[in-house]
Image: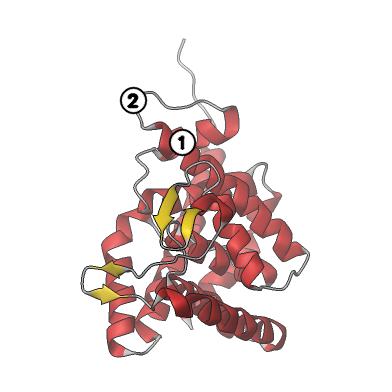
Amino acid sequence: MEIMKLLQRYQALNLSQNIDYDKFSQYSITHHSTCLEGSTLTEIETNLLLDEGLTPKGKPLEHSLMTIDHANVLQFVIESAKQKKNIDVAFIQKINAKIMAKTGKTYQTAFGELNSVDGIFRKGNVVAGNRYFPNFDKVEALTKKLSETINIKLKTTSQTIEQLYLAFDAHFDLVSIHPFYDGNGRTSRLLMNYILAYYNLPMAIVFKEDKAEYIQALEQTRNEETLLPFRNFMTEQYAKFFSREINNFNKQSKDKGKGFSFVF
């Protein structure tokens, strides 16, 4: 498969040996994931915020707080993957709680006042356009079943392509359960990247400029009741990331070979 050839080419570059490559790769994941949810920070502004603590002028403070939260929880996910932690309901809730740490809101419900910073499951039903998500009283059971399924497959899936599909499928399944009041997309993409990191595979980006195609792939998968459309979309996103990084590496290698010319 073409994606496997690209993965091998990317891994052969061993970019993690370069200073700060992993850090700025993680910044890029944070930038694109938060922009999908409405952040207006540019990639440079994201880097300066996370690297130097510089809050961009003229941008909503909430967008900076969302970015900081995502960067922090991404570190939590990476460390958890290194420790091979099991995925359970509490783990998924913890990811969401960390995602909403600085931007969570309080909701008045029939069950009392609930705060999304606690990673609690929604206590109401959700409709987005023509899409009805599972009733709130099914959310915990569905999330528990998903967690158990992922844990079994984590330990039994050995082929790389199947590991990729496990990560992509978990992303689709969790966002389709839509268990939380807010942060479902970010939580689902972080769950996907937990699985990829668990297998020591490069983490994935859903590129902000492909948001319309992302939503379309989710809807097509639900409508057709087959995971193929979303798997294809995520495979294309993964390939896009590899191609971009390989091209950047090749360009920089050529530029280094040219040296510099200064005119005084």
Q: Position of residue 236 (x, y in %)?
A: 40, 71
- Say if 73 sits above or below 20 in the image: below
Residue 187 shows in the view? yes
The mark nearer the N terminus, 2 or 1, is 2
- According to the image, label 2 marks what residue? 58
Percent across and percent down for residue 102 are: 52, 41
Residue 17 shown left or right of residue 251 in the figure: right
Q: What secondary structure is marked by label 2?
A: loop
**SS type, badge 1:** helix
Figure coloring: secondary structure
The residue that disc 1 covers is: 64
Residue at position x 65%, y 42% from top?
20
Q: Quadrant of residue 50?
A: top right
* Number of other residues with Cα within 10 Å of mark 2, as a class: few under 14, some 14 to 19, many 20 or more: few
227 and 245: which one is in front?
227
Residue shown at the point (65%, 67%) measured from the top left:
90
Q: Is residue 25 visible?
A: no
Question: Which residue is pictured at 50% across the width and 65% down the height?
Answer: 121
Q: Is residue 130 above or below residue 60?
A: below
Quick one: which residue is furthest to the left in this view? 130
Q: Nearer the viewer, residue 9 or 150?
A: 150
Q: Amino acid at mark 2?
A: Gly
